[in-house]
Amino acid sequence: MANVTRLQTSYTTLPVEAPQTAPPGGGMPPQDGTTGVSARQILGTLRRHKLLIGGLALVGTTIAWLVANQLTPIYQSQGELVIEAKASDTLSKTDGMTMPLDYQKMETEAARLRSEKLARITVRKLNLIEDPLFNPDMAPPPQSRIASVFAPVLRILRLGGEPPAPRATLDEARRRIAAMTPEQRERMYDQIADLWALGLTTQVTQASRVMTVRYRSPDPRIAANSVNEAIRTYIDDQKEKKGQDALGLAKFLASEIEGARRRNVDAERKLAAFRSANEMYVDSDSMTTMTRTLLEMRTQWLTAERAATEAELRVRNGGGVEGSGSTVLQEVLIAEKDFQALAAIFGPEHPEYKKAAQRLGAARARLGAERSRGGDIQKADAKALRDSAEKLKTELNKLEVLIKKQTEGSSELRTLQAELETSKQLYQTLLARLQTVDVESKRERTAEAEQITEAAPAVLPVAPRKDVIVLMAFLASIGLGVAVSIIIELMDSGFRSIHQLEQHTGVAALGMVPFQSNRLRRNSKPWLSVVDKPNSAYSEALRTIRTGIALSSADHPQRTVVVTSSVPGEGKTTTSLSLASASAASGARTLIIDCDMRQPSLHKNLGVENTEGLAEFLAGQKDLEELVHVEPKTGLYYVLAGKRPPSPTDLLGSLRMRRLLEQLAETFDLVILDTPPVLAVSDALLLVRQTDTTIFVVRWEKTRRDVATAGVKMVYEAGARLSGIVLSQVDLRRHAQYDYTDSGVYYYQGYKRYYGEG
């Protein structure tokens, strides 16, 4: 205590100095530190909120499972039938061939299968009027809401089931059905048919003649029976329709045959009357012969006409001898030749000349007589040729008139003949079709449709897909959990790491102090861990902070340290006491002073009474040596806050307080001042300019970023020399889940080897 006594005696001799100003660059440069989102950050978010996500997934999946099991299961059965237009169909116009069916035809048949008429027939065959699904009177009494909710669980545990309908209720319902009038029964069947038709569907494809019939129902047996009965009803309806069509066709054919017979008789009469009126008894072959005769006769007439014309021309030219080829003309020509030859030699008086003239005259006389006889013959021949040509002309004209008459009436004749032939063919066709109808009506009726696949009761329901519902609910719950986790992260306003703290405040961080409450024994204190467990992560964190304080100013030792925070509850006192204990345990003379006179807490941590302390010293009521005490386990010196004074601010800002700090800095190696929060009161702001350095404590996760930033700003503006910020009460396990450079620094397995519990 000698040093403490010396400090007391020399306290009044300390000079008064003006407060120092803030160090250069003391202004706070806060930073946003916004960075992009990485996959590690996303995975870290999911890992941190895995219990929330898992809980929501479990609750959502359980609710979906209960709801899905309350839904009525729907079973589906299906059957197939093939439809063909067969050649044996009496209405078909083909012989021995299968008519192709188009998509529209198949759709028409599908609509016929789903028709209201066949639905009424089917529900009657199935006797659905006594089925609980279609008649509520036959259904069992409904379960209570609570029982229906827990029915799936009871079914799994085999503790419950569907309660059967009481026998008395079923008998009473059957009696009511039997007592219905025909009109009431018909109306009820119509209602059941409408309800039943809602579950019936058909499907056809363009590539085949196969129709698929499906039915959905809560009862798999009803689903299978409905498909099979609907197909059978459709096939029976086709057979009945074919029988009705055959009977109607027979009646129609009988009336058509009678009409065709009458039309055939009328056509024959018209043809006979036309032939008689127009004398047209020749057929087409006779007309061909007549035409050929006409051509030959025209050739003969032309030949006779040419011969008669040539004969008449010879007669007019008088060329009877030349025409007949007589030798008299030759004699005349010879006589003329001889005469001309002698005339050229002799004169008219010469005897040879005269003999030649006589021979010429005699030859000419004979030629004239010959010509007279030949002209009569030629005239007779020419007349005979002309008469023959005229006769041929007359016959030719008659034949042309006959052919023209036949040609003009042949068109109408052919029309009448075609009508008669058509009438005969129609009559024969109708007779043949009537015979076919008679044969078909006596044979067994067959339908165009044939069932190729029979429906069977389904084992598993097709709806609702409980597995899909549960899976979707699970995924939705996971998504909701992820969304809530992201919202929580986005709404998180606290600091998660020293890296994040430095980014937002612009101040270097000295380190982080692990949270110790779950690691301590009963009635143990966190600040005692530095003595009990010097190699623990908690002790190492405090030593790191202490080293940071020492290195914050290499030229001037940091002996007086103010520890403050923004708001209460940030672990400021525990950090101050732990830091002081660590310093004392290392052998340094360390003093801690509780400067929070308004809400003192140092005495509670040390387990002593706060009867007197700093307040009494600053008020001049006590000497300092009476107020300094030693914690026996750590060797730490401490001064309590004392009783609350009227004005703590005046005492802390007094000259006496300033001189006390200066003297204590000379006496102790380290003096730690535990001060009030800066946003609550201004007490700490009065001390930050009077000490060597300041430590600002921020609670991990709890302290809001804006609050911490405002506190740091106030400390800077007060002129403090801020060594750094300490992140207190860090949950190491959760801290390791964040994607920061310091995440898990005290938690990784490799790091944990460096720390121990002893």
Image (cartoon, grey):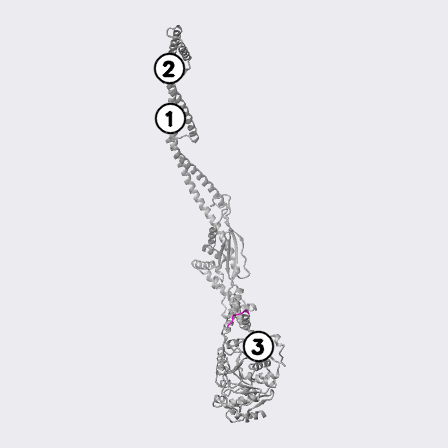
Q: Which residue is mark 1?
A: 398
Q: Amino acid at mark 2?
A: Gly
Q: Is residue 35 magenta?
A: yes
Q: Amino acid at mark 1?
A: Lys
Farthest residue toward the top? 351
Query: What's the distance in space between the residues labelled 2 and 3, CA to CA?
Result: 164 Å
Q: Which span of residues is magenta-colored? A: 34-39
Indicate the position of residue 590 as horizontal and vertical percent values: 58, 87
Tell me the tag on residue 732: 3
Query: What's the distance in space between the residues labelled 2 and 1, CA to CA?
Result: 35 Å
Query: Judging from the image, what secondary structure is the residue with disc 1 in?
Result: helix
Q: Which residue is mark 2?
A: 375
Query: Judging from the image, what secondary structure is the residue with disc 3 in?
Result: helix
Asked if residue 643 can be seen in this view, the reply is: no
- Crowding at dot 3, Cα within 10 Å, few <14 / some 14-19 / many 20+, comes out as many
Along the viewing direction, whichever of 40 and 31 lies nearer the viewer: 31
Asked if residue 610 can be seen in this view, the reply is: yes
Q: Is residue 663 magenta?
A: no
Q: Earlier in the sequence, mark 2 or mark 1?
A: 2
The N terminus lies in which quarter of the figure? bottom right
Q: Amino acid at mark 3?
A: Leu
Q: Earlier in the sequence, mark 3 or mark 1?
A: 1
Question: Is the stretch drawn in magenta largely helix, strand or loop?
Answer: loop
- Crowding at dot 1, Cα within 10 Å, few <14 / some 14-19 / many 20+, comes out as few
